[in-house]
Structures are given as C-alpha cells and as structure tokens.
Amino acid sequence: MKAFGAALILSLSLVGAEHVLAADIPVPGGAPIPPSSYYPVSQPVNWGGVYIGVNGGYGLGSSVWKDSLGSTDSFGVNGGVAGGTLGINYAGFGDWVLLGLEGDFDWSGATGSTGCSVLGPPLTASATCQTRVDWLATFRLRAGYTWSNFLFYGTAGGATGDYRLSSANPTSSHNPTPPLGWAAGVGVEYLFNDAISAKLEYLYVDLLTVGCPSGTLCSADGTNGSVSFKESLIRAGVNYKFSW
C-alpha cells in the first residue's frame, strides 16, 4: 500500500511539471492574433477636391411659340449633348455627407419644328417654325450621401442656352439673348480610386421663355411674342479629381 501511495504521488508530480513546462514553451508561429486584426481595415474614401471631366448624353425637349393671335402646340426639340465639367466637392461635414458646386458647358444638337401659321401673317398656311439650341450650360449645387465608393446626390441651380429660331414660308431667323432658367435632377457617381470617377445623372432643364420683339418672326402679328424650351436630359460622365 505504501508503494502504491508513493507511485501515485510521483505520477501527480510529473503531470504538474508537464503543465508548467507547456506554459513556458512558445506556440509555433508566434503569439495568437487578436480577432480584431484578422481582416484588413479599409481606408476611408476621399471624395473631397477639385475635379474636371467630360460628359455626354441625350435630351428629350419641347418648345412652344405664341403671340397674341395664337399658340403652336408643344412640339419635340430633341438631340444629343456633349461637353466639359468643372466642380469642387467638400466632404468635411461627416463620414457620409458631401456638398459641392458643379458647372458644365455642352454643345447641343436639340432641334425641332412645327407648323406655325396660327401666329398670323406674314406667315403663310404652310409656314413652319423651328427651335434649335446650339449650346447648353448649367451651374448647380450638389448635395449627396456617400456610401463607400458610391455617391448618391441631388442637384439644382441655374441654366442657360443659345436659342436659334427660324421659319420657312417665309424664310426668317432670330437669335435672342440666351435666357436664364433653371435645372434640377439626381445622379449616382462611383469613385474607382482617389482620382477617377464615373457618373450617371438625370437633369430637368427649363430655359423658360425668350421674348420676341415686334417685327421678329415669332411676333408676326406686330406685338411681342415668346418661345419656350424645356428638356429632360440623361447624361453620363467621367471626372478626374486633383490630389491638391
């Protein structure tokens, strides 16, 4: 019995010594990695800065000619646009809020015509009137929500464009001073890296009306007339953001 007790005590002593030695032996491959560092932490996306870009798209517009004798029906004035963009973003309001200013200047191919004898002499029964917009410019505030590399934004501001008015039977033309209208819309933009982004946006543009002084083709009755232009515009664009 004494021999059994001595053997039991010796066995327990050896097991305890093994546990002590095991605690002092380093685990192969270094210390365990804390769970919080298992995955790399993504760097914050920098949306702020000055940028330039190019854009292009297509617009579905409408125009109306009127004077004291009558008014044409609203007729289509459609065409493509292409041009350049300049803007600045400020992202200092928090992790998700962005404010910016953006301006663009586009060539426009918007053109459309309709019968306009209703406006009175000297326009004949077969007379046609054409509205053309040769260029379009907007200057707008942008406000948006950033989610990682995406920006979802709304935009609104001023707009102007170059009216080119003409008629056939008789042939005449009038180029009024570009009016000041407004534009508003929504868009989404994706930032590929710190410099390059691409966007898709919808803009509603209203150039309001241009007056036609007495004696011009859009005031054939001898009183002041007017011509209006509105457009729904879909554009895509690519921007380059400077690092300074």
Image (cartoon, helix red, strand yellow):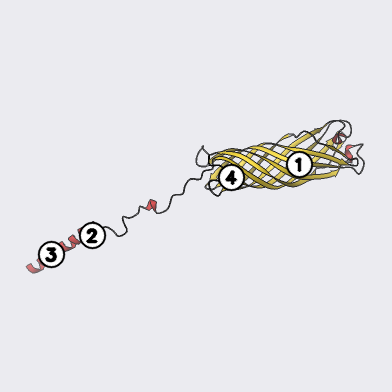
Q: Earlier in the sequence, mark 1 or mark 3?
A: 3
Who comes first in sequence, dot 4 or dot 2? 2
Residue 242, picture quadrant: top right
Query: Is 49 left or right of 132, judged from the image as shown?
Result: left
Image quadrant where one finds the N terminus:
bottom left
Q: Earlier in the sequence, mark 4 or mark 1?
A: 1
Left or right: 135 in relation to 85: right
Read off the residue under disc 2.
22
The answer to which of marks 3 and 4 sits earlier in the sequence is: 3
Q: Where residue 63 sits in the image (x, y, percent)?
A: 79, 41
Mark 3 lies on a secondary structure that is: helix
Residue 15 position by quadrant: bottom left
- Count of numbered circles in the view: 4
Q: How would you rate the neighbour count of disc 2 (Cα within 10 Å): few for under 14, some for 14-19, many for 20 or more?
A: few
Residue underneath mark 1: 134
Residue indicated by mark 4: 240
Distance of label 4 from label 1 (alpha carbons): 26 Å
Residue 230: mark in rendering: none
Label 3 is placed on what type of residue?
Answer: Leu
What distance separates the C-alpha of mark 1 from that of mark 3? 102 Å
Q: Give the secondary structure at mark 4.
A: strand
Residue 138 occupies which quadrant of the picture?
A: top right
Residue type of the residue flagged with mark 1? Asp
For marks 2 and 3 on the same chain, the one whose residue lies earlier in the sequence = 3
Q: Amino acid at mark 2?
A: Ala
Q: Tell me if mark 4 has few (under 14), some (14-19) or many (20+) residues whose alpha carbon lies within 10 angstroms of its own.
A: many
Q: CA distance from mark 3 to mark 4?
A: 78 Å
Which label sits in the foreground, 1 or 3? 1
Query: Badge 3 is on which residue?
Result: 10
